Image (cartoon, rainbow, N blue to C red):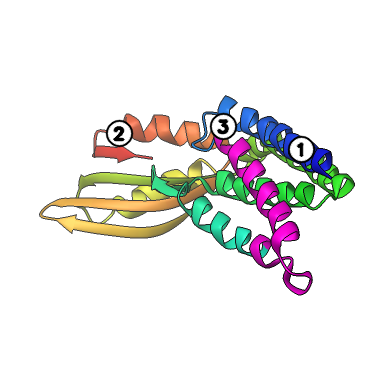
Amino acid sequence: MDYEILLRLLVAMLWGGIVGAEREYRSKSAGFRTMIMISIGACFFTIMSQLIGEESSSDRIASNIVTGIGFLGAGVIFVGDKRLNGITTAATIWVVAAVGMGIGAGFYLFSGAACVLVIFILSVLPYFENVIDKINKSVTYSITCDYSNSIISDIENLFRKNKLKYKLTNHIKKGNELTITWIVHGSAINHEKFVQIISNNEVVKKFEY
């Protein structure tokens, strides 16, 4: 029994290390050591839940892992560059703990299948995401310029000429200055064309995206 527990902890460490290495390579906030600790912790809590819990409540400790991991995952989510970051890392923490629990409970086959799927998702699917972004990419543009009655329609005409779909989300007027924000969808090439045109526009005082 003692050797079985040791094996489960070693397998959990290996699993956490594999995912952690991938996250470390991509310079994510939860990297190599963090993922190992999460995997071993979830595995050990599950083992202890089985060993010290009563027969009718052997899952009491293990069931609280989900709540604890939720708080840990929330800590890596942050807002930056006008978008929400860290959601994939938070989800990875969640699934690493889930697989660690599976290993701790002795379900090696199911845990192994989950491992393969997670590594596939983290390693292979980003290439598909890049392909999708080239076809249809969402960008938030913020443009500041002198106010005029036609400025919004003029810029939206540029969106249409460059085959970009747009949605006006905000506009703020301060004195004679107008700051306008759009969420724009389109291919990466069309976005590049628009950025080049608007960057050379003498009317535009400030341009962010």
Q: Is residue 164 visible?
A: no
Q: Which residues are magenta?
A: 33-62
Q: Quadrant of residue 116?
A: top right
Residue 134, percent across and down?
A: 62, 35
Q: Residues within 10 Å of mark 2 (few under 14, many from 20)?
A: few
> In the rendered image, which quarter contains the C terminus?
top left
User: Given the current orientation, which residue lies at the most extreme bottom position?
Assistant: 56
Q: At numbered mark 3, what does the secondary structure look like: helix, strand or loop?
A: helix
The answer to whether residue 40 is left or right of residue 170 is: right
Tag shown at residue 33: 3
Q: CA distance from mark 2 to mark 3?
A: 49 Å
Q: At numbered mark 1, what does the secondary structure look like: helix, strand or loop?
A: helix
First in sequence: mark 1 vs mark 3:
1
Q: Quadrant of residue 194?
A: top left
Q: Residue flagged by tag 3: what amino acid is it?
A: Arg
First in sequence: mark 2 vs mark 1:
1
Q: Residue flagged by tag 2: what amino acid is it?
A: Asn
The answer to whether residue 94 is left or right of residue 198 is: right
Q: Residue flagged by tag 1: what amino acid is it?
A: Leu
Q: Is residue 45 above or below residue 205?
A: below
Front residue (pair 137, 145) = 137
Identify the residue at horizontal 35%, vertical 49% (top origin).
Answer: 154
Front residue (pair 181, 60) = 60
Look at mark 1 in the image and give the residue it sits on: 6
> In the rendered image, which quarter contains the N terminus?
top right
Tag shown at residue 201: 2
